[in-house]
Amino acid sequence: MKNLCYESTSNCLLKCPYCISSDNGVMEKDHYLEIIDFIGKLLPERLVIGGGEPLMDPLLKEKITLIIKKYHEANEEPYISLSTNAASLITQDMWLFLRNSIQCLDISIPSLNHDIYAQMRGADLLDQVLINIRKAVNYGLNVRLSIIMTKQNYNELEKLFEFAAATNVNSVRVGRYFPFRNAYNVKDNYELDETTVIKIIDDINNGKYANIYSGKILPPIKTLSMMSGYLNVDFNGMLFVPNIEGKQLISNVHDIDISALESSFKDSQPKIFIRYKEK
Ligand code: SF4
């Protein structure tokens, strides 16, 4: 299994109108032990921990520590990417923990303009994000900026690359708006037309920004159908793939047949055909 995204909490201090994970509802019970057991059986090559906002998860350290233990028990090393809005205060203790525990801090920053930031994220916490990006670099983390291109911010790409160069982050991922789950309902306000997305992809691939920023740049994926192999597990232990209709439910961490799951997602996870384990 290559990729798994673990939506570990419903807590978040922002309120993006297009938040896809808001359809998970509010967490009543944290099923993390069962979910981490599942992760330990699957051992994905890359585990993305997101939310909500994972840095607002009071059990984040415990979860990451347990996940690392699972990999080590299998004589494997994890690749954990923490997907964060970086809008909260982060203690020194947490910075040191992250530096020693995760392989990538993926910070989403849609804009350097306070008004656009507030419009896209529901609150203007941009200054704190900028502080945290600089701190993450200073603490020696592998920092990736994630910039989702929308109607609001796509003209800012050059400025964002200048910022990436000035802060010396390790990589930048330019993403496209996924009109999936709850984001489908507000897609007309945010989603760029396909021609603009293709132009952004071509500009990146043709090196338009390479003179501004010399780190690694990951362009948006070419088609939305490439998301058909993007496996998620939410804090209730439900396994699903996001799509326009919402969530394509696969199973849950108790019932899933791991080898059937593995073979279904083989070869870059293009097709989903999962058998439930016999009860
Ligand atoms: S920062 Fe992420 S989790 Fe929080 S509201 Fe925005 S999209 Fe949702």
Image (cartoon, rainbow, N blue to C red):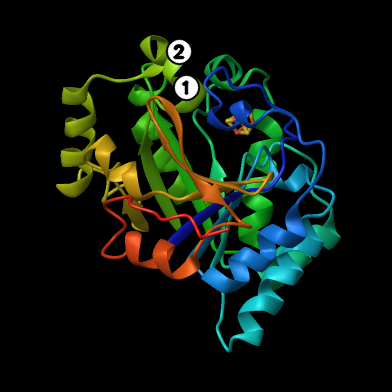
**Left or right: 109 in relation to 274:** right
Secondary element type, mark 1: helix
Is 197 placed above or below 208 here?
Answer: above
What amino acid is at disc 2? Val
Nearer to the camera, 79 or 110? 79
Residue 183: image tag? 1
Residue occupying image coordinates x 49% and y 44%: 240
Q: CA distance from mark 1 to mark 2?
A: 6 Å
Q: Residues within 10 Å of mark 1 (few under 14, many from 20)?
A: many
- Marks 2 and 1: in contact by CB < 8 Å? yes
Quarter of the figure with residue 220: top left
x and y percentages locating residue 194 in the rendered image = 20, 24
Secondary element type, mark 2: helix
User: Quick check: can you spot residue 168?
Assistant: no
Q: Residues within 10 Å of mark 2 (few under 14, many from 20)?
A: some
**From the image, which quarter does the C terminus lie in?**
bottom right
Is 232 placed above or below 253 here?
Answer: above
Residue occupying image coordinates x 61% and y 56%: 253
x and y percentages locating residue 167 in the rendered image = 53, 50
Residue occupying image coordinates x 40% and y 49%: 230
**Left or right: 208 in relation to 158:** left
Looking at the rendered structure, the number of numbered marks drawn on it comes to 2
What amino acid is at disc 1? Ala
x and y percentages locating residue 166 in the rendered image = 49, 48
Quickly name the residue at label 2.
186
User: Quick check: can you spot residue 178?
Assistant: yes
Tell which residue pokes out farthest to the front in this image. 279
